Image: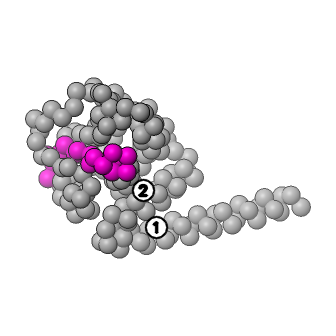
Amino acid sequence: MQSGQIMVGDHQGIYVVKLVGDVRLNLCTSFDNFIDKMFSHSDFRGVVFDMHDAEGVDSTTLGLMAKIAFRCEASNGNKPVVLCEDRGLLHLLDSMGFEELMEISGDADNDAYQASPAPLQCHAPDEHSAREMVLEAHKVLMSMNEQNEETFRDLVHALETEHATKFHADTEQKSAANH
């Protein structure tokens, strides 16, 4: 699999998120920052996910896609559009319940957007940011349906426990340093 890349662009308030290769956590903090900027634009009208060149996506990326869908619904009631022909990716989206959140099309000739996406400048996340991103993304996935809640419950619990333990250890360390 080719390493992943996220490309973004917009045309008249329609934002295109093109996923290329194997899109993983290492791209997600920059992607999350882009999401916040995208929704802050007054001309925002919708999102198209172009997955024609995607080979794989991890659960953190899927969680951010779901986050976008929920924010679209809250902002203007529109569902994002997903353009994808890959049977494996379509099955993944279906099995996770994305058909409830997005309009999924296998039409390779769909010219739903006129934007010219450019590579999103992605920076490797620090350990804390990565942990927070994984936790948030999986909580979003859990909120989609009962099956996802069951699938990701243990992971989210483990991440929350790890976060609480690390926070407690950091607090004790700071307290000891001040004495």
* Residue wearing tag 1: 156
Q: Is residue 92 visible?
A: no
- What is the span of residues highlighted in magenta in the rendered image? 72-87
The reply, left or right, for residue 56 in relation to residue 107 is right
Residue occupying the point 47% across, 57% down:
136
Q: Which mark is residue 78?
A: none
- Residue 111 occupies which quadrant of the picture? top left
* Residue wearing tag 2: 137
- What is the secondary structure assignment of the residue under circle 2? helix
For residue 51: magenta?
no
How many residues crowd mark 1 within 10 Å: few (<14), some (14–19), many (20+)?
A: some
Q: Is residue 68 above or below residue 118?
A: below
Q: Is residue 33 above or below residue 9?
A: below
**The residue under label 2 is which amino acid type?**
Ala
The reply, left or right, for residue 32 in relation to residue 151 is right
Residue occupying the point 54% across, 50% down:
129
Q: Is residue 160 above or below residue 34?
A: below
**The residue under label 1 is which amino acid type?**
Val
Q: Position of residue 64 (x, y in %)?
A: 38, 50
- What is the secondary structure assignment of the residue under circle 1? helix
The reply, left or right, for residue 119 in relation to residue 102 is right
Q: Position of residue 124 (x, y in %)?
A: 49, 41
The reply, left or right, for residue 89 in relation to residue 117 is left
Q: Quadrant of the N terminus?
A: top left
CA gap, disc 1 to disc 2?
A: 10 Å
For residue 80: magenta?
yes
- Residue 171 occupies which quadrant of the picture? bottom right
Residue occupying the point 46% across, 41% down:
36
Q: Earlier in the sequence, mark 1 or mark 2?
A: 2
